[in-house]
Image: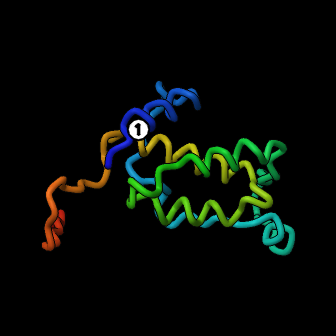
Amino acid sequence: MCQRKYALELVSELGLAGAKLAATPLKINHKLTSIEFDKQIPLAGPTVDRELKDKGGYERLVGRLLTMTRPDIAFVVQVLSQYMHAPKVSHIKDAQRIVRYIKTAPGLGLFMSAKASKSLYAYCDSN
């Protein structure tokens, strides 16, 4: 199961065709917070992450991500979907990072053989 065409359409519709590639779907040790958390524990710094005005765009983007054919992004999409009720600007940037990650290998997907087999094969990269 590969959705290469769908992935490339998603990249071009978001205008990220010329954007830098992302090596991982989410930055390492990146913490996502909610609006309520930010109100209780203000961040020390000049920038304040504000709530998105267009929640519909965020909902559409997270809903369109390829979690069924791309298990490598399933966890990150699940985490982003927890903020659907009140997304912030940082959340939409993280969702766009996932699209830039998908852009690195748009043809990546699950392989399902046409012939019936009762054997399970798994491959692991030892790096």
Q: Is residue 10 above or below residue 59?
A: above
Find residue 48 and report its horizontal and vertical position in percent.
80, 54
- Looking at the rendered structure, the kind of residue marked 1 is Lys
- The residue that disc 1 covers is 103
In the image, is 120 to the left or to the right of 26?
A: left
Q: For this view, does 52 lie left or right of residue 103?
A: right
Whether residue 121 is situated above or below residue 24 in the rendered picture: below
Residue 4, above or below 35: above
At label 1, counting other C-alpha atoms closer than 10 Å, the crowd grade (few under 14, some 14-19, many 20 or more) is many
Q: Is residue 91 left or right of residue 24?
A: right
Describe residue 43's horizontal placement relative to residue 99 as left or right.
right
Pick the front one: 44 or 54:
54
Q: Nearer the viewer, residue 14 or 42?
A: 14
Between 95 and 66, the one nearer to me in the picture: 66
The spot of residue 89 in percent (x, y) is 73, 48
The C terminus lies in quadrant: bottom left
- Quarter of the image for residue 30 reads bottom right
User: Where on the picture, by quarter, is residue 45?
Assistant: bottom right
Residue situated in front as seen by the camera: 86 or 37: 86
Residue 56 in percent (x, y) is at 76, 45
Q: Percent from the top left, x then y, of residue 112?
A: 24, 56
Is label 1 in a helix, a strand or a loop?
Answer: helix
Residue shown at 60% from the left, 66% from the top: 31
**Scheme of image coloration:** rainbow
Name the residue located 81 percent from the left edge and 64 percent from the top edge: 35
Instruction: Tell me if residue 2 comes above or below residue 15 in the rendering.
Output: below
The residue shown at (38%, 41%) is 3
Number of marks: 1
